[in-house]
Image (cartoon, rainbow, N blue to C red):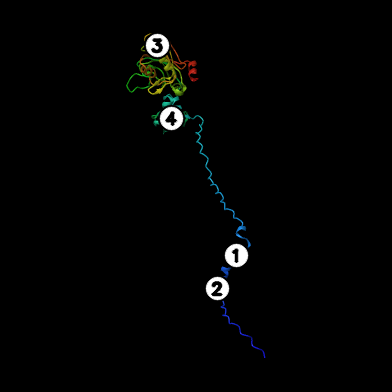
Amino acid sequence: MRKPAPKGPRTAPTKTRSAAERSAARSTERPAARAASRAGAAGPADRPARRPATRRPAPAPVKAPTKPAARPTAPRPKAAGQERLQKILAAAGIDSRRACEQIILDGRVQVNGRTVSELGTLANPRRDEITVDLIPIHREDPVYILMNKPKGYVTTVKDDQGRPTVMALLKGVPGRLYPVGRLDFNSEGLLLMTNDGALAQVLTGPEHEIPKVYLVKVHRQPRPELLKEFQEGFLLSGRRLKPCHIEVAEKGDNPWLKVTLTEGKNQQIRRMFAAVGHPVSKLRRVQFGPLADPLLKPGAWRHLNPQEIAAIKSL
């Protein structure tokens, strides 16, 4: 008979884990096992050092394309026969070109019935109807007259105070003329009368420095150092004048001086000498640019000859 097997100690029955528990266990065991495996394969001393992270430089901002600078508007080209309005007015004997510019700015000029107040406006004097104060203008032939102005007249076309003007000395001269340059009421000498506005602008513009020669009688003889100061540029009313040339024309207790100016401030010579204690008793202009005539009597006038006209137009 077979003997029965000896009975061993009893073991507690093993509980069967659910699928959810097994899945959770695997999810915690696997990362730990991988970490242990890496630690066993390479110790802390053998682990390669990581490279420090480097930041890439930020890309430069892209500038928006800049628009090219606007070019200045080119002046409107002249059509055949067109001229600037102020030049047309000056050529018609209205006044000097600078004065005609002010007439335009004042809104006194009309072109084909439309008021124009902008400088640089172009017009055709042969085709366009141009009026000043609604009075039509007409291009006149240029006239050039040399006058010896006497005392007691002002060098304007009209005078608000009712004093006689140099226009009263012109008789039998057609067209509208006007004086060029200044000579005060008590001064005398050569004066140009014309209707050529472009030429008047050249003769009176300070940038052209047209020489004008005067004979001046002053009270007492000025010191040489004072005359030198005038020649180097005298300071008058806070403004330095341009140098002028001075020489003694006739000696005496009240000498005659010959003064040459290249600018013409209002009563400049009288103010200069009065400021230093040598008041002017007489003043006479004897030369205006290339024009001179010692035989022309005060109050008389004459037309310029062709050589004189060519000379002043060459300035």
Let me know if residue 179 appears in the view.
Answer: no
Q: Which mark is residue 36?
A: 1
> Where residue 86 sits in the image (x, y, percent)?
44, 28
Report which quarter residue 257 is drawn in: top left
Closer to the N terminus: mark 2 or mark 4?
2
The residues bearing labels 1 and 2 have C-alpha atoms spaced at a distance of 23 Å
> Where residue 238 sits in the image (x, y, percent)?
38, 23
Mark 3 or mark 4, whichever is nearer to me? 3
Identify the amino acid type marked 3.
Answer: Trp
Identify the amino acid type marked 2.
Answer: Glu
Under circle 3, the secondary element is: strand
Identify the amino acid type marked 4.
Answer: Ile
Residue at 56% x, 71% y: name it: 25
Q: Residue furthest bottom?
A: 1
Closer to the N terminus: mark 3 or mark 1?
1
Mark 1 and 2 residues: CB-CB less than 8 Å, in contact? no
Q: Which mark is residue 21?
A: 2
Mark 2 or mark 4, whichever is nearer to me? 2
Mark 3 and 1 residues: CB-CB less than 8 Å, in contact? no
Identify the amino acid type marked 1.
Answer: Ala
Under circle 4, the secondary element is: strand
The residues bearing labels 1 and 4 have C-alpha atoms spaced at a distance of 109 Å
State the quadrant of the N terminus. bottom right
Q: Residue furthest top?
A: 252
Closer to the N terminus: mark 3 or mark 2?
2
Let me know if residue 308 appears in the view.
Answer: yes
Q: Which mark is residue 256?
A: 3
